[in-house]
Image (cartoon, grey):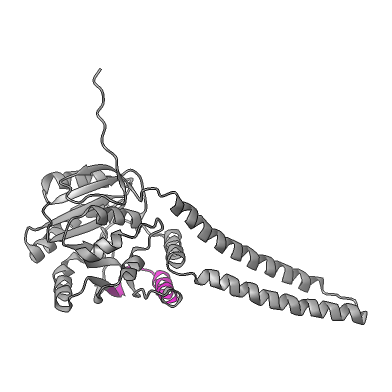
Amino acid sequence: MHRPALSIVVPCYNEAACLDLLHARITGAAQSAVGDDYEIVLINDGSRDDSWSVMQRLAAADPRLVAINLSRNHGHQLALTAGLDLCAGAQILIIDADLQDPPELLPQMRAAMAEQQADVVYAVRRQRAGETVFKKATAAAFYRLLTKMTDTPIPVDTGDFRLMSRRALDAFLSLPEQARFIRGMVAWIGFRQIPFAYDRAERHAGETNYPLAKMMRLAFDAMTGFSTAPLRFASHAGLALTGVSLLLFVYIAIGWLSGSAVQGWTSTMLVTVFLGAVQMFVLGMIGEYLGRLYVESKRRPLYIVADIAGPIQGKATLGFRAEPTETPVT
């Protein structure tokens, strides 16, 4: 099997309006970096627009492009995993389809990787054009909080835009967990990883595929996947509340022995509600971790490939490729 010098992996969800320009720009970037020795891997993550038909058209016209159609919407992180699993390049560029991350930085990222003999070059955002103050503030707070909570340092102000060596990718693909936070998983594998600062642009077209609900889900996956701090917090909260309860018991006992009537229904209810809320939080946190153990125990494939357009060179190891069936002739 020929291994191209470069694979460019792009997960796509409802990105039909971006795909033609995306193809032109990443083709130009790849040719300027490695000539014709590259492949482009587009993953259709159950899009509801014309993304798959556009990908098929591009694959028919470009022999270096392969389009992968997943059986349903698996989510950005699993779609990206599918592309990484199926690509074959010696170096792998991960980039989103919305063109907020400029593919023209590829030659500079390759030069930095070669100069510093790194296995991962991760892009660090200096400026984030077109994003609200709320999103910028919450993203900055999340990454800094996550760094303090985890034992594995995860670079702040980074996304999935990065260049990886084949050995770093192979190490990443050995991690089989279902709830995936790829930028954290790449940080966990180690090797030499260096930052590359850049300014992020606005979306070329369409709407963000990471609304607040999905961002919160990703944040929770990151926290529970890379840290047991929430469980430690639950234990510490339980110990603290036990101490408070003992003090409250002493106060009640002294009041009963002195013969004074214990008044203050409001304060009693306040304490009851507070303790109940903390207990529900602790149970919910434990349930979240137990739920993840339950999901992992099923050992389901991370993704299912329904269709492939173009010459596939990689071989899936983490997913399932459904073979097409022929319609019987009657």
Query: Horizontal placement of 47 versus 150: left or right?
Result: left
Viewer-closest of 8 and 141: 8
Instruction: Identify whether 75 is placed above or below 147.
Output: above
- Of the 4 image quadrants, the one containing the C terminus is top left
Query: Horizontal placement of 304 versus 266: left or right?
Result: left
Residue occupying image coordinates x 48% and y 56%: 293
Would you say residue 284 is visible in this rendering? yes
Residue 154, given in percent of the width and then of the height, sits at 36, 73
Residue occupying image coordinates x 20% and y 51%: 314
Q: Quadrant of residue 113?
A: bottom left
Query: Horizontal placement of 287 versus 11: left or right?
Result: right
Viewer-closest of 257 and 44: 257
Most distant residue in the top direction = 330
Most distant residue in the left direction = 35
Instruction: Identify whether 118 is placed above or below 216.
Output: below
Residue 136, given in percent of the width and then of the height, sits at 39, 72
Q: Give the magenta-colored segment's residue range.
A: 124-145
Q: Is 164 one of the magenta-colored residues?
A: no
Q: Is 140 one of the magenta-colored residues?
A: yes
Viewer-closest of 16 and 302: 302
Viewer-closest of 184 and 172: 172
Residue 266, given in percent of the width and then of the height, sits at 78, 71
Residue occupying image coordinates x 19% and y 43%: 309
Would you say residue 95 is visible in this rendering? no
Q: Quadrant of residue 251?
A: bottom right
Instruction: Identify whether 87 is placed above or below 110.
Output: above
Residue 135, given in percent of the width and then of the height, sits at 40, 69
Query: Horizontal placement of 139 versus 254: left or right?
Result: left
Q: Total number of numbered labels?
A: 0
Residue occupying image coordinates x 36% and y 51%: 302
